[in-house]
Structure formats: structure tokens, C-alpha cells
Amino acid sequence: MAGFRGTAGGATARFAAAQAAIIRDLVGQVMELIGADELQGGGTGLDDVLPGEPGGLPAGADDLAAMVAFAEDAELPDDPVLARLFPDAYRGDPEASGEFRRYTEQGLRSGKAAAARTVLATLPPGGGRIRLSEAEAQAWLRALNDVRLALGVRLGVTDDFDEQVADMGPEDPRSAYVGVYQWLAFLQETLVQALS
């Protein structure tokens, strides 16, 4: 199983059709989970609509919040995967975490969605060789990390997870996903090395 190799200004890799399908499916699932379709148009900016203008935000809306497309819900998500992808910034201080989340979560979601879109745009559904610029490779690193975080939550990855995997039999429904999780870790590692 080959990983990424460095090129002048980026990285390259070859994926079989089944490998490409796995990556595309998992990245697509993360996009769906973070609500990437809702972010397609991007956040509200000054060039789009201004508070108080016809069709714009209501008069009196927080101008800064409007520019950065703040999140209405400033609570830690109930879904454990979303909570891992968007953790509290200040553990033990829900009020500070909520305020931080209010102004940053939409930007984080947009960034994660953009990284996922880069993976989907650069990885053909049927597999094959891909050549990534450094910026595309960085997006791949972020998207692969998001997929691994999501899988890690679903698999219950903890500090002693390697010991659990050693005791896991092939009949365990998690065993196939553990292989994918470890493969994604390998891809991340080779991509980091390719960019070094």
C-alpha cells in the first residue's frame, strides 16, 4: 500500500477505485454532518447585504456578528462527533466557550467544508494518480484529520485503543473500521512527510 510522495510544490499519490470510494464516502459523510450544504453560499459579508437594507439583516443586528456570520446556537453540540470536531475552547467555562463558539463556529465549519470539497475535487471517483499543490495537500490533511476524529469517536478510540484492537476479533463489527482508521493515519503520516 503506497502513500503520498513529495513533489516539487506538493504531493502525489495513487488510489485504487475502492480506496477512492472509501475516502470520498467518509469525507462526504463528514460534510453532511457539519452541514456543508447549508454553507455552500458562504457567510454573510459586507458585499452581500448590510444590516437595515432591504433584504438584509434586521436593523439593529450586531454588525460584527453579521460580518462574521455568527452562530445562533453557542452550545457544545449534543452529537459526540460534532463535539469532537468543534470542541469547547475554554473547558470549565461554558460562558466563555459559548461566546467563542458564537463567533468562530461558522468559520470553522466553512473551513472544514472547503477542505472536504478540495478532497472531493482532486480525487476522481474511479481512483488513479492525483497531484496536489501544497495548498491542496494541506486541505487533504485537514479533511483526513476530520474523518479520523469522527471515526475515532464512533470507534471509542482512547489511549489504550491499541490494546483493545489487539483483543478485537474479526467478528467484531468495528474491525473493518479500525483498518480504515489505521490506513487514514498512514495516509496522513505519509502526506506530512511528503510536505516536509
Image (spheres, rainbow, N blue to C red):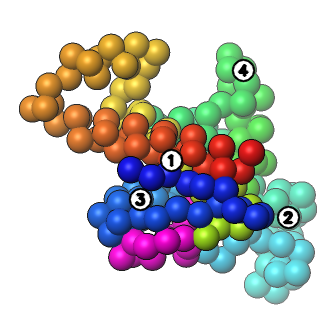
The residue that disc 1 covers is 187
Give the magenta part as a residue range.
114-130
* Separation of residues labelled 1 and 3 (CA atoms): 11 Å
Per the image, label 3 sits on a secondary structure element best described as helix
Frontmost residue, 167 versus 35 = 167
**Label 4, residues with CA under 10 Å away: few <14, some 14-19, many ≥20:** few
Sequence-wise, the earlier of marks 1 and 3 is: 3
Q: Nearer the viewer's eye, disc 4 or disc 1?
A: 1
Sequence-wise, the earlier of marks 2 and 3 is: 3
* Separation of residues labelled 4 and 2 (CA atoms): 26 Å
Q: Is residue 55 above or below residue 94?
A: below
- The amino acid on which the numbered mark 4 sits, given as a three-letter code, is Asp
- The amino acid on which the numbered mark 2 sits, given as a three-letter code, is Met
The residue that disc 4 covers is 93
Sequence-wise, the earlier of marks 4 and 2 is: 2
Q: Where is residue 150 in the image (x, y as percent from the top left)?
A: 45, 42
Per the image, label 1 sits on a secondary structure element best described as helix
**Label 3, residues with CA under 10 Å away: few <14, some 14-19, many ≥20:** many
Q: Nearer the viewer's eye, disc 2 or disc 3?
A: 3
Per the image, label 2 sits on a secondary structure element best described as helix
- Residue 127 lies in the magenta stretch: yes
Tell me: 140 left or right of 79. Answer: right
Cβ atoms under marks 1 and 2 closer than 8 Å: no
The residue that disc 2 covers is 67
The residue that disc 3 covers is 23
- For image coordinates 74% across by 45% down, the residue present is 196
Frontmost residue, 158 versus 90 = 158
